[in-house]
């Protein structure tokens, strides 16, 4: 059955290709090659139009590369290369384009439709997000005009990511709604080129917002997103086709590069919702593997190293890294001290066997004891945080020696709970080239471990069962310094993700003195987080680019 979409007395159908690509920012040669391959695959599949994500020629987010004129010119040169490929297929791509007006920012964030060897239409982005990890108004001038484009009988309303996010919100961020402007042009379908980073609740939010647009405008939507990671930001794909009734006719895989097709005549068939399942811990697991894989692959690194203590965080990090890079590319150093329990050493060795990774055992006591012999006349008697911190710093000397000699990238294993309250040693266990679990609370790390073990015991059960400890002094437990993680993590979540005040948190039933103590710890340790490795972002509010706090401040003191 053919779709009935009236436009100037015509009835049209169209096969559309959704190109959910994974590219490296600024790799113009590689990106041009990939786009050309996808265009050819779309043509071979009978598509009349192929849609790529936002800023698909440069990658997202290009950040201050946009301040280089040469960077923008190279993006424009790729667009010119694509024009001959559009002789018999529409190509919808995104790139930065110069703003011809002297007033305002020098660039636009633009979607360009190529067809029959020329540029058929361009639409600039209107709503420029400047919050959390987004900083687009730093670079781009918003659109000042809005037009649809007729393409092979269908009138397309082309939008870019945030342009659809001013609906379905109790407190809209913007005073203008670009789709409302486009509706006066009587479009038949909404097209959205997106660069929408992952967090564990965003896939649900995305569908809610798109359905709000469907309901408001009574139009179907084709939404195309990136897959893959760019440093700390992870893109989950999940590109969508939603009909006028709000049914998800197609949802592309998560964290997977994919070209898929949708024929608009399917809109005339009875609606069936094809939404994919979205289980939180499964998504976080896959996101972290994607983040590790692309961080290494896109920079050109191949092998990783980490310290394996016999604790939960290093075990989960090792398991994720082995899945992302392959077990043969992971080296673990077991670096016991006189305070390391026999069970921790045996648990670490069992994990090494289960994962099939490389490992070496290098005790730190032969370095710690003479170091203390040298320092004792100056430090005096006693044992406190000074001696505790020397131990992870010695371990870091070992790890960085292997890193330098063999080219391994050091993976940081600290979790978000520890990073929040400063439970870590600068230039010791806080060092690394990439923070794998820095946006995962300790209670979520347990969930990840159970998920990893869902089919077989990979992480030894004893690691999950024993009380967490840094093992830097006799009988030490994390609870000597911190409240239990099932108490700590909800308070941290309310403060960091929900931005609740101390009184707001206390009103939810938490002990007032405990809340104030925890929040003081968070604020006083901002200086440590300024020196962290990039943190893979999986939550709505991660440490790093998306959370900018002053180091010197008295709020909550």
Image: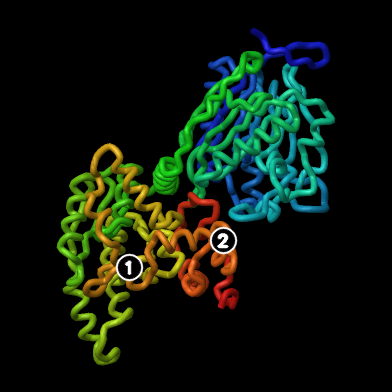
Q: Is residue 105 left or right of residue 184?
A: left
**Measuring 43% from the left and 45% from the top, which residue is drawn there?**
284
Q: Is residue 26 above or below residue 399?
A: above
* Mark sitting on residue 542: none
Residue 271: quarter of image? top right
Identify residue for label 1: 478
**Measuring 52% from the left and 21% from the top, which residue is drawn there?**
41
Q: Residue furthest top?
A: 1
Where does the image place residue 408, in percent across and percent down from the top left?
Answer: 32, 54
Q: Is residue 382 left or right of residue 273?
A: left
Placement of the N terminus among the 4 image quadrants: top right
Is residue 294 in view from this perspective? no
**Measuring 33% from the left and 79% from the top, which residue is drawn there?**
385
SS type, badge 2: loop
CA–CA distance in space, label 1 to label 2: 26 Å
Residue 214: quarter of image? top right
**Measuring 19% from the left and 79% from the top, which residue is drawn there?**
369
SS type, badge 1: helix
Q: Is residue 360 left or right of residue 406?
A: left
Identify residue for label 2: 547
Q: Is residue 419 left or right of residue 429?
A: right
Placement of the C terminus among the 4 image quadrants: bottom right
Where does the image place residue 347, in percent across and percent down from the top left?
Answer: 19, 55
């Amino acid at each position: 059955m053919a779709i009935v979409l009236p436009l100037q007395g015509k009835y049209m159908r169209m096969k559309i290709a959704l190109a959910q690509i994974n590219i490296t920012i600024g790799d113009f040669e590689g990106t041009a090659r990939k786009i050309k391959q996808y265009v050819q695959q779309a043509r071979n599949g009978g598509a009349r139009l192929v849609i790529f994500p936002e800023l698909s020629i440069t990658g997202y987010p290009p950040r201050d590369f946009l301040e280089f004129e040469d960077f923008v010119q190279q993006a424009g040169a790729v667009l010119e290369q694509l024009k001959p490929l559009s002789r018999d297929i529409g190509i919808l791509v995104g790139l930065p384009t110069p703003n011809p007006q002297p007033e305002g920012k020098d660039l636009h964030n633009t979607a360009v439709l190529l067809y029959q060897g020329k540029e058929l239409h361009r639409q600039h982005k209107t709503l420029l997000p400047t919050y959390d990890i987004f900083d687009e108004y730093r670079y781009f001038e918003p659109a000042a005009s809005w037009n649809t484009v007729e393409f092979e009988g269908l009138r397309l309303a082309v939008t870019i990511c945030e342009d659809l996010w001013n609906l379905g919100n109790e407190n809209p961020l913007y005073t203008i709604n670009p789709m409302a402007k486009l509706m006066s042009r009587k479009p038949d379908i909404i097209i959205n080129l997106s660069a929408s980073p992952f967090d564990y609740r965003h896939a649900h939010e995305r569908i809610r917002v798109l359905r709000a647009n469907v309901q408001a405008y009574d139009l179907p939507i084709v939404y195309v997103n990136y897959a893959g990671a760019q440093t700390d930001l992870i893109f989950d794909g999940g590109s969508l086709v939603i009909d006028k009734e709000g049914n998800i006719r197609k949802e592309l895989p998560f964290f997977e590069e994919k070209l898929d097709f949708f024929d608009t005549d399917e809109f005339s068939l009875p609606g069936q919702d094809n939404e994919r399942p979205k289980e939180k811990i499964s998504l976080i697991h896959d996101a972290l593997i994607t983040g590790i894989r692309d961080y290494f692959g896109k920079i050109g690194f191949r092998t990783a190293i980490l310290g394996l203590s016999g604790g939960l965080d290093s075990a989960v990090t090792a398991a994720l890294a082995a899945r992302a890079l392959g077990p043969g590319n992971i080296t673990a150093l077991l670096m016991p001290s006189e305070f390391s329990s026999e069970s921790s050493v045996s648990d670490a060795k069992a994990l090494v066997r289960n994962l099939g990774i490389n490992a070496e055992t290098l005790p730190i006591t032969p370095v710690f004891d003479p170091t203390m012999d040298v320092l004792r006349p100056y430090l005096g008697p006693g044992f406190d945080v000074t001696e505790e911190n020397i131990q992870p710093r010695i371990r870091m000397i070992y790890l960085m020696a292997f890193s330098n000699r063999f080219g391994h990238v050091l993976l940081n294993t600290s979790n978000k709970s520890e990073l929040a309250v400063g439970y870590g040693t600068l230039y010791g266990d806080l060092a690394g080239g990439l923070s794998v679990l820095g946006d995962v609370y300790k209670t979520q790390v347990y969930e990840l471990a159970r998920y990893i073990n869902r089919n077989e015991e990979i992480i030894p059960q004893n690691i999950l069962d024993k009380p967490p400890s840094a093992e830097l002094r006799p009988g030490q437990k994390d609870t000597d310094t911190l409240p239990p993680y099932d108490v700590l993590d909800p308070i941290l979540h309310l403060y960091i993700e929900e931005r609740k005040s101390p009184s707001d948190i206390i009103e939810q039933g938490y002990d007032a003195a405990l809340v104030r103590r925890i929040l003081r710890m968070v604020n006083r340790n901002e200086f440590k987080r300024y020196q962290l490795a990039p943190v893979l972002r999986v939550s709505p509010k991660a440490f790093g680019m998306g959370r900018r706090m002053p180091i010197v401040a008295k709020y909550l003191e």
